[in-house]
Amino acid sequence: MTANPRRQLRPTDVKRLNRTWRRNTEGRLALIVESVTGPFNIGSIFRTAAAFGADRIWLAGNATPPTNPKAQKTALGTDRLVSWEEPVPVTEAVRAAKADGFRVVAVELTGDAVPLHEAELSGDVCLVVGSEDHGCSPALLEAADAVCYIPQVGRVGSFNVGVATAIAVAEVRRREWAALGPARAAGPE
């Protein structure tokens, strides 16, 4: 009898698999989180950023820091795996990201936004997400290099900011890995 190939991987196998993906990831990824105040959203964003290897998160406006006890419940300690900056005015965060060599791409519904799947997301990218209620501020949108949106076909007007962040971050990495082709892509053995 042969072993079931669909068994869940053991922790050592998961570490090995993740290490392979990490070796095939070269692009730097960062986030600017503007005025996201929900601690569970902050925790989710930090956990997603850590899982996808983000280099840094700049908090802007009145964003809740990941040290908030409710944010910690969702982040599960992942805030220690991603460098982050205390909240500053959003234009300062954008300036810092650009000075660090990132292309700043806001995730927002605007008249000139392109669909996420068509956005220029190669190289070193800093994605920007805005508050739960109002999205990205006009100052942020003016300072960003580009704007993209996540297409939706349902009857809901927008995603939760934590979910939107996860979708956009996953798309950045997916594109990088897809460009490697199947020969270099990682998979379980």
Image: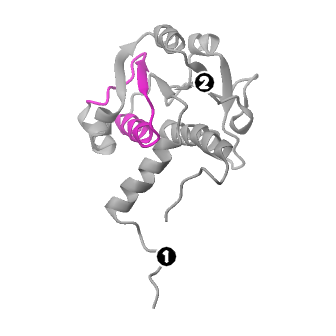
In the picture, which quadrant includes the N terminus?
bottom left
Tell me, yes or no, whether the two marked residues, 1 and 2, touch with CB atoms within 8 Å: no
Labelled disc at residue 27: none
Q: Report which residue position mark 1 lands on.
A: 5
Seen in the picture, residue 17 relative to 45 is either above or below; the reply is: below
Q: Dot 1: few (<14), some (14–19), or many (≥20) neighbours within 10 Å? A: few
Q: Position of residue 176 (x, y in %)?
A: 62, 39
Would residue 123 be visible to someone looking at this image? Answer: yes
> Can you tell which of label 1 and label 2 is closer to the viewer?
1
Numbered range of the magenta stretch:
39-67
Residue farthest front in this picture: 183
Report the side of 110 relative to 92 (left or right): right
Three-letter amino acid code of the residue under disc 1: Pro
Mark toward the start of the polypeptide (1 vs 2): 1
Secondary structure found at label 2:
strand
Would residue 156 be visible to someone looking at this image? Answer: no
Residue in the picture at 64% in, 44% down: 180
Magenta stretch: residue 131 in it? no
Residue 71: name its quadrant. Answer: top left
Residue in the picture at 44% in, 82% down: 3
Q: Position of residue 43 (x, y in %)?
A: 36, 38
Three-letter amino acid code of the residue under disc 2: Ala
Residue in the picture at 70% in, 24% down: 110
Magenta stretch: residue 43 in it? yes
Q: CA distance from mark 1 to mark 2?
A: 41 Å
Seen in the picture, residue 180 relative to 84 is either above or below; the reply is: below
Labelled disc at residue 106: 2
Report the side of 14 relative to 90 (left or right): left
Q: Position of residue 12 (x, y in %)?
A: 33, 60
Q: Dot 2: few (<14), some (14–19), or many (≥20) neighbours within 10 Å? A: many
Q: How many marks?
A: 2
Seen in the picture, residue 122 relative to 176 is either above or below; the reply is: above
